[in-house]
């Protein structure tokens, strides 16, 4: 087991290296002037373009730029994100709590609702309930994320006069959270509100989370539901379940205790996919709701050709994904003895 | 020398199980309301795409994919007798845009799925069949692609190649092939060890023959599922790119492009907040139903074709 | 699950506000919230050159003097109490006010003023505003303290001797008369900083030895902190999100009425609009296409027809790059554009008579703009009231196209690719107008319109690949020199990519700026305007007119085209909320 973990962790290195090389290959496509455009915000600076290119090494051959960049990375410096005017490492730490807060609500919701729907669907297979549930889940998945977000905003912020607003906090709450009376332990607003014992801040934070979380959840429920349904169906047909039924156990116990538990295993796998799926959804959702998290920052940076930011973000997310997959596989192995011993 | 009818009978016999399975699948499809709905939706869209020149006549000399517009006025106009679905900002006809956008959607999804499938097929087969170091190398490469946040990868490629529909197409193909490679490889691996493969090789069948005659046909089902789901997923992703401004150019008949037009018109004047609903809702519904159709179909395929779930 | 939906729905409906009388209550009465799309690049006054940074610096720091109210040629004292200019225009003396404190408590002295200017010149970052000090103080034609290889070429003594303390005054020693110098000193890059505080932050210690170390830094030294004398101080800057300013109660004039100012970066128009309607935002930036949506709404005040000092032009490229992908065959054979296409004046005139300003201004600008005759636009001194303009005239256009290239152009036709930067609707519309009108003249004329993202557009423009390119300019200071040098000079910021070299023009521009006699200056700029019409190196497309939108409980906002942040934001000192 130990060697398995170590081997998997070691695999992290070539994968990360691959990500880096891939991004630098993309860099090849960019002209130094195109990259310089990031620093040129008004026409008076056009005449300074050659100087800017020289100053920031934009014209050096790719391997030279790569060398400088790697040197800094090994010192813990991921460069300067010009699109946000912060060092990249600072930017990641700065924007992470917002995205985490979204995930803290969206992941459990998606998984719980998905499991429930999957179960219902499997148990009542091919009956109307099954078709309706599957239809709804797939409909949710077919909605373009940005479209759903904009529609929700239109109804709940416009029509209902500010019930669920965009961004993270209202003006008053924002001022309070940044004042001396409040300590921002984690910068996850709902969590901090609880730690500071301020219910009205908690309410305000939740109010702003409702729509983005709904948008993220609705689109991703189908993943979980589908896996749960098919694995549930599989285990419902298994030998030991048939035996349990024959023994006289009631339907409910059979489903919950026997079939249900084994069916959960693939859901763990889905949790891994969920993280990357949610990351992609978060990028669009954060943009639509002006919810300033990692997703928003990455789009902002990519559009402006902020290469250090794109590199830093990719490395960060790549690492998270690989680690998540590792954790998932370990959980899988832990739960299913066949894999562990095999 | 066998007679023709004998050979024909033998062929029929060898195909009989396949035909029986096919009939069973078709019956399952007919019995599943979700797949019926899915197929109907797709047929409607296919009809729209084929009949586009009839439904929305293109202006003579121009590229038919450029939406006609009268003037440049920025305010969208609601549906009227000249413009069935109204106009967007810049006076682009929504009806024309969504009709020809159907063609664009099919073009994008078929091209991407087809190319990704082809590339994935080749790589997956090679990796799975030959195994060893070839397999390791290809799998690490797909790992890298799959670990990379795909939206950022697509954005980076599109920005590098210059924003246009073609760049989006290429970027999508580059990002999408790894999952097919992985799928094919897994199928190849599972089938490789089967006895009948050993038998085929023992009889002297070449690698290529073994792969095409035995491995591929058995791997078709999960690929079919993934491909139909992807037809929808790709249109969604391309629409998202256009929404972010990285896709089709202004005035091109593309659903995502049309929604990006509507971004500033989500909320109308107070007292009439939904005044410009048609700019957002209509293109959005087209995307939604297109994706829905393919997703329902893909999901139904999964249910019907998964050997473990087929006969319950 | 169903129960949850019903409950949420019930709560939602019950919370819906119905009474309009509620917008009589002023929201956040002592905080002004401004939602916009830009973000400041830097809080360092010598580094910042964008208007978003300028707006913040304007409210936290102060220069020696400021434009008076809405005027662009009258000034009122700030850090300086009074000033005199010598007759030869070479010496500017400013008497420095006493009793002014920085926000950290330090008392302002004339030495701080001198340090501020020298510090700026020492820093002189690439792409920064400091060239506006270098030209008057070191010499016309000096745009940088470094040469083209990046090595320092201006010795420290020149910087050191340019501005000195004399008693309670500060004296500027110019190398030659420079009309707009006083205008340059009235802006944010001339803000006065606290020498001791800057040094404590690790900025330039003020010595000759450290000059090179602090020249052209990679990042601004005063990026995140501010210590000014102005009516507001920095509370916090949340990158990408917002900046919050708080009232400075120790301000040397009456403290501001607002307790705080919040400038938020909100990219979605929908979000900004909803905030404005709900009263959560007091000022918002509105894209032109959407201004009509908030006109005449209750609780909202819109101020229109604000004259700007900004203009857009389309530049003809006299020598297109051979390798350009946009010129087709590159020959006059009907399948491309020859590289010297626009060096033929008849071609340029043909295009000039093919642009429909009426349609453009009506459709692209919603009527909010006008056609300037030349780069010397309305609002600047020395505008020639009789300057001639071009207008749509297909007969004349055809006439000139027939004469172009000795008749070969009309015979063979051409294929031209016009680029615009994506997202810029007016520029796209201007391209379409050219296409429509020119293609109508001759079936062999073909124009293709292509959109490119800004970095690619910039790359192609710099490389000389574009046959025509659109660029706009906003005044650094309200003087014609700023515009003519940008639009017409061979090394101008905008014109440098078109390869238009007219030695007479360059001479006039160079003599115009150092000419102390207003009458002679007028002659020079009138002549330049005439040459612009005769030579038509570029075509002035528009000078826009601006709007400002605010909640009607806001009072005290004023407009000045030079102040950074206007017309949407601006100077917050006189602003207060209430009825």
Image (tube, rainbow, N blue to C red):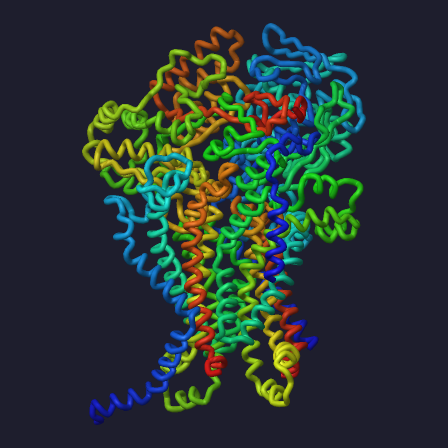
Q: Is residue C111 visible?
A: no
The picture places residue A97, in percent across and down from the top left corner, at 68, 52
Q: Is residue C306 left or right of residue B56?
A: right
Above or below for A120 versus C40: below
Residue A86 picture quarter:
top right
Q: Quadrant of the C terminus of chain C?
A: top right
Identify the residue shown where x is 50% and y is 21%. C307
The quadrant in which residue C114 appears is top right
Is residue B198 placed above or below B181 in the rendered structure?
below
Q: Quadrant of residue A279?
A: bottom right
Q: Would you say C176 lies left or right of C84 here?
A: left
| Res. C182 visible in picture | yes
* Residue, far bottom: B1
The x, y position of residue B201, in whole percent, is 40, 87
Q: For the N terminus of chain C, which image quadrant?
A: bottom right
Establish if C228 lies above or below A186.
Answer: above
Number of dots carrying numbers: 0
| Viewer-nearest residue: C324 or B69 | B69
Q: Nearer the viewer, residue B141 or C258?
A: C258
x%, y% of residue B204? 37, 88
Q: Position of residue B95 (x, y in %)?
A: 35, 48
Q: Is residue C260 above or below residue B152?
A: above
């Amino acid at each position: 087991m130990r060697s398995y973990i170590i081997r998997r962790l070691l695999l992290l290195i070539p994968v990360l290296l691959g990500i880096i090389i891939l991004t630098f290959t993309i860099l090849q496509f960019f002209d130094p002037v195109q990259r310089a455009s990031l620093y040129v915000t008004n026409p008076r600076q056009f005449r300074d373009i050659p100087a800017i290119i020289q100053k920031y090494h934009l014209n050096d051959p790719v391997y030279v730029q790569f060398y400088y960049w790697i040197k800094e990375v090994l010192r813990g410096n991921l460069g300067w994100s010009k699109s946000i005017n912060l060092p990249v490492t600072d930017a990641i730490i700065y924007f992470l709590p917002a995205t985490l807060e979204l995930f803290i609500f969206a992941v459990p919701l998606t998984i719980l609702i998905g499991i429930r729907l999957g179960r219902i669907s499997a148990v009542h297979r091919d009956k109307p309930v099954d078709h309706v549930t599957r239809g709804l889940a797939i409909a949710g998945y077919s909605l373009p994320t940005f479209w759903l977000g904009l529609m929700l905003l239109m109804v709940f912020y416009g029509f209902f006069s500010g019930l669920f607003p965009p961004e993270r906090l209202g003006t008053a709450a924002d001022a309070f959270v940044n004042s001396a009376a409040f300590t921002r332990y984690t910068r996850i607003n709902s969590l901090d509100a609880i730690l500071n014992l301020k219910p009205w801040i908690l309410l305000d934070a939740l109010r702003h989370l409702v729509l983005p979380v709904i948008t993220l959840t609705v689109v991703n429920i189908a993943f979980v539901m589908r896996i749960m349904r098919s694995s549930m169906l599989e285990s419902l047909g298994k030998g030991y379940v048939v035996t349990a039924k024959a023994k006289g156990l009631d339907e409910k116990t059979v489903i919950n205790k026997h079939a249900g538990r084994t069916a959960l295993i693939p859901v763990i796998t889905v949790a891994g996919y969920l993280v990357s799926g949610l990351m992609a959804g978060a990028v669009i959702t954060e943009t639509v709701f002006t919810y300033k998290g990692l997703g928003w920052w990455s789009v902002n940076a990519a559009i402006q050709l902020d290469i250090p930011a794109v590199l830093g973000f990719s490395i960060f997310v790549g690492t998270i994904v690989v680690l998540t997959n590792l954790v998932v596989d370990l959980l899988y192995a832990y739960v299913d003895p066949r894999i562990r011993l095999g | 020398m066998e007679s023709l009818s004998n050979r024909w009978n033998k062929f029929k016999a060898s195909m009989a199980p396949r035909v029986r399975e096919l009939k069973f699948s078709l019956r399952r499809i007919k019995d599943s309301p979700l797949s019926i709905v899915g197929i109907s939706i797709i047929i409607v869209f296919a009809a729209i795409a084929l009949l586009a020149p009839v439904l929305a006549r293109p202006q003579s000399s121009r590229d038919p994919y450029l939406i006609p517009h009268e003037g440049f006025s920025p305010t969208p106009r609601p549906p009227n007798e000249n413009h069935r679905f109204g106009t967007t900002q810049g006076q682009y006809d929504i009806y024309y845009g969504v009709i020809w956008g159907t063609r664009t959607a099919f073009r994008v999804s078929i091209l991407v799925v087809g190319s990704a499938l082809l590339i994935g097929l080749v790589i997956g087969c090679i990796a799975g069949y030959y195994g060893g170091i070839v397999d390791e190398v290809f799998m690490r490469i797909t790992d890298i692609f799959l670990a990379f946040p795909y939206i950022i990868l697509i954005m980076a490629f599109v920005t590098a190649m210059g924003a246009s529909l073609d760049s989006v197409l290429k970027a999508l193909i580059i990002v999408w092939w790894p999952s097919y490679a992985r799928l094919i490889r897994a199928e190849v691996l599972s089938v490789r060890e089967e006895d009948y493969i050993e038998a085929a090789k023992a009889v002297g069948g070449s690698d290529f023959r073994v792969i095409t005659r035995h491995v591929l046909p058995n791997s078709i089902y999960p690929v079919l599922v993934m491909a139909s789901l992807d037809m929808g997923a790709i249109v969604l992703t391309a629409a998202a790119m256009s929404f972010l401004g990285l896709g089709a150019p202004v005035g091109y008949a593309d659903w995502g492009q049309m929604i990006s037009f509507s971004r500033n018109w989500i909320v109308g004047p107070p007292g009439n907040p939904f005044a410009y609903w048609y700019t957002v809702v209509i293109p959005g519904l087209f995307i939604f139903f297109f994706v829905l159709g393919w997703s329902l179909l893909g999901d139904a395929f999964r249910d019907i074709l998964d050997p473990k779930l087929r006969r319950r | 699950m169903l129960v949850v939906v019903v409950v949420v729905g019930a709560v939602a409906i019950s919370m819906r506000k119905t009474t309009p009388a509620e917008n009589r209550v002023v929201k956040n009465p002592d905080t002004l919230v401004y939602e916009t799309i830009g973000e400041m690049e830097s809080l360092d006054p010598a580094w910042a050159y964008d208007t978003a940074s300028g707006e913040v610096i304007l409210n936290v720091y102060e220069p020696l003097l400021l434009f008076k109210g809405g005027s662009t040629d009258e000034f009122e004292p700030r850090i300086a109490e009074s000033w005199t200019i010598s007759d030869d225009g070479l010496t500017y003396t400013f008497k420095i006010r006493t009793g002014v404190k920085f926000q950290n408590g330090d008392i302002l002295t004339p030495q701080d003023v001198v340090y501020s200017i020298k510090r700026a010149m020492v820093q002189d970052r690439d792409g920064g505003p400091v060239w506006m000090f270098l030209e008057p103080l070191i010499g016309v034609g000096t745009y940088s303290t470094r040469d083209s290889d990046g090595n320092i070429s201006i010795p420290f003594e020149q910087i050191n001797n340019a501005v000195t303390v004399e008693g309670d005054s500060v004296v500027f020693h110019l190398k030659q008369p420079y009309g707009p110098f006083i205008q340059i000193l009235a802006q944010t890059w001339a803000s006065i900083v606290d020498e001791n505080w800057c040094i404590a932050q690790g900025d330039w210690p003020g010595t000759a030895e450290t000059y090179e170390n602090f020249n052209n830094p990679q990042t601004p030294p005063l990026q995140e902190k501010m210590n000014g004398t102005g009516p507001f101080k920095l509370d916090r800057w949340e990158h990408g999100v917002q900046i919050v300013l708080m009232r400075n109660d120790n301000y040397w004039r009456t403290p501001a009425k607002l307790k705080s100012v919040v400038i938020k970066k909100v990219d979605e128009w929908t979000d900004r609009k909803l905030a404005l309607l709900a009263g959560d935002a007091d000022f918002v930036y509105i894209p032109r296409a959407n201004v009509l949506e908030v006109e005449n709404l209750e609780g909202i005040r819109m101020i229109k027809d604000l004259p700007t000092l900004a203009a857009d032009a389309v530049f003809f490229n006299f020598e297109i790059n051979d390798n350009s992908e946009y010129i087709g065959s590159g020959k006059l054979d009907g399948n491309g554009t020859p590289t010297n296409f626009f060096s033929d004046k008849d071609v340029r005139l043909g295009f000039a008579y093919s642009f429909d300003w009426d349609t453009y201004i009506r459709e692209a600008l919603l009527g909010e703009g006008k056609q300037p005759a030349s780069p010397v636009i309305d609002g600047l001194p020395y505008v020639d009231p009789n300057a001639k303009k071009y207008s749509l005239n297909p007969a004349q256009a055809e006439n000139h196209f027939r004469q172009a290239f000795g008749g070969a152009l009309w015979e063979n036709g051409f294929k031209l690719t016009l680029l615009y930067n994506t997202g810029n609707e007016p520029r796209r519309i201007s391209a379409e107008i050219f296409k429509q009108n020119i293609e109508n003249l001759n079936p062999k004329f073909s124009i293709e319109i292509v959109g490119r993202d800004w970095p690619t557009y910039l790359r192609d423009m710099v490389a000389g690949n574009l046959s025509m390119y659109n660029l706009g300019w906003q005044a650094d200071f309200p003087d014609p020199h700023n515009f003519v040098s940008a639009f017409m000079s061979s090394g101008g910021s905008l014109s440098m990519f078109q390869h238009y070299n007219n030695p007479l023009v360059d001479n006039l521009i160079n003599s115009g700026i150092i000419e102390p006699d207003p009458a002679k200056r007028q002659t020079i700029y009138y002549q330049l305007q005439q040459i612009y019409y005769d030579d038509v190196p570029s075509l002035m497309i528009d000078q826009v007119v601006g709007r400002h939108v605010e909640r009607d409980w806001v009072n005290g906002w004023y407009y000045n085209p030079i102040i950074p942040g206007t017309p949407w934001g601006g100077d917050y000192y006189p602003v207060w909320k209430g009825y």
